[in-house]
Image: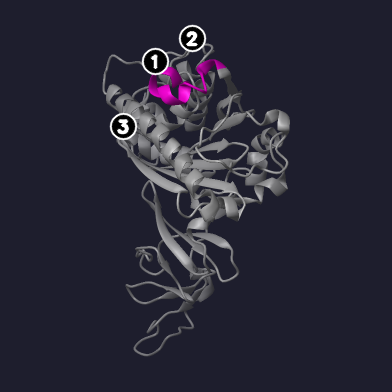
Amino acid sequence: MKHKLNGNKKIYDIINKKKLDAVNKPIERANGLPNECYNDQEYTKIERKKLFEDKWVVVGVASSIPKAGDAKPFDLLGIPLILLRTKKNQIKVYHNVCSHRGYKILQKKCNLKNVLRCPYHSWSYNLEGKLISTPHIGGLNIHESKDFNKSSSKLKEVRSYIWLDLIIINISENEISFNEYIKPLKKRWSQFWTENDQKLIRHSKDFGYFKLKARSNWKFAIENYCESYHLPWVHPELNSYSKIKDHYNIHGLPNRFSGQGTVVYNPRLKGKIKLPCFPNWPKNKNNIAEYISLFPNVMLAIHKDHFYAFWLEPISHKLTIEHMEIYYVGNKAANSKKFKSLRKQNMKLWHEVQSEDLNIIEGMQEGRNSPAYNGGNFSPVMDNSTHQFHKWVATNLI
């Protein structure tokens, strides 16, 4: 039986209900997400609405637009957006479309002096999104019209929040507040750092960013990040000092995040000095680090001496851009010459680790072309965190 809504396909038109139900079974009997969730373009349209428009999603970092007037375009699975810092030093996110004839206003990153001008008919908006100029709207050299209300044609703002420098949005505005959404993870991590510690994070300008192009679905990056099961075979160097036996699973309740942690974090960076640590990090937790996927599209890591956010920009159902943002404790650690060598080594380490994972997730994408694969099975012990993510996807698609 077909399920249609306004002529658009619904999830059970694309995926048999039994396949999704199998994902939510106890892990011993569960299957993973079916192939359609990774290689079907029609499915991707539903996923965009259910998992990206309806949820809190990372679209960038505030430090990438540091000055008042800085603005950059960003497309979220085809939805054009503007990330902008106002004159009041506030981060705003707008739909990147002129209210007049629907032209995509901002084409490239720039610094705006006072206005955002549409190249089509020169309608202009201030940085707060207010429509302030409508040339010739009432006829030649008549720039106002009593029949047109400017105030009703401002740029459409997107609900947004800044947390740990991340720009996080909820397009449909039907999710709970971000403060409420993130509360379980903040509570968990309060055992490591305080609010004051978090205020110290600074993005490194020299060795604080890299990106990778993954020829795979974005979900593979998340589910791979959730578990440490693959360490001995995919990350032999990392596994030489942070072995699989030293890791533990993490399950967020309610189910908004999952991941894994290690009890033997001990960075092997060469040099006579060490990176500064968060002032309130407990001494008895110095060797603990945690790696958490906050659904849907950001992978976070907390260590005593640095924090990173590895966020995903899905381009299509089989192409993803991975953005790594690395932060240190205070500006001196993040940007001074004194710690430059350590920053360089640290970025090289994470680039190598994520590049090793890249080969794996691209291979998984290729494997999903097999009609013989039913979504796979899970280790009841080692794959719990990955199963949590699969359940989150399957549950929120309905």
Residue at the farthest bottom position: 141
Looking at the picture, how far across and down is residue 146, in whole percent? 49, 83
Please say which color scheme the image uses.
Answer: one colour
Crowding at mark 2 (Cα within 10 Å: few <14, some 14-19, many 20+): few
Q: Is residue 165 visible?
A: no
Q: Is residue 39 magenta?
A: no
Q: Is residue 237 magenta?
A: yes
Q: Nearer the viewer, residue 346 or 273?
A: 273
Q: CA distance from mark 2 to mark 3?
A: 25 Å
- Residue type (three-letter) at the residue carrying disc 1: Gly
Q: Nearer the viewer, residue 345 or 398?
A: 345
| Residue at left offset 48%, top offset 9% | 29
Crowding at mark 1 (Cα within 10 Å: few <14, some 14-19, many 20+): few
| Residue at left offset 54%, top offset 55% | 336
Crowding at mark 3 (Cα within 10 Å: few <14, some 14-19, many 20+): some
Q: Is 47 rendered above or below residue 162?
A: above
* Residue for badge 3: 40
**What secondary structure prevails in the magenta region?**
helix
Looking at the picture, how far across and down is residue 153, in whole percent? 48, 69
Looking at the picture, how far across and down is residue 54, in whole percent? 51, 42
Looking at the picture, how far across and down is residue 197, in whole percent? 69, 46
* Residue for badge 1: 376
Marked residue nearer the N-terminal end (3 or 1)? 3
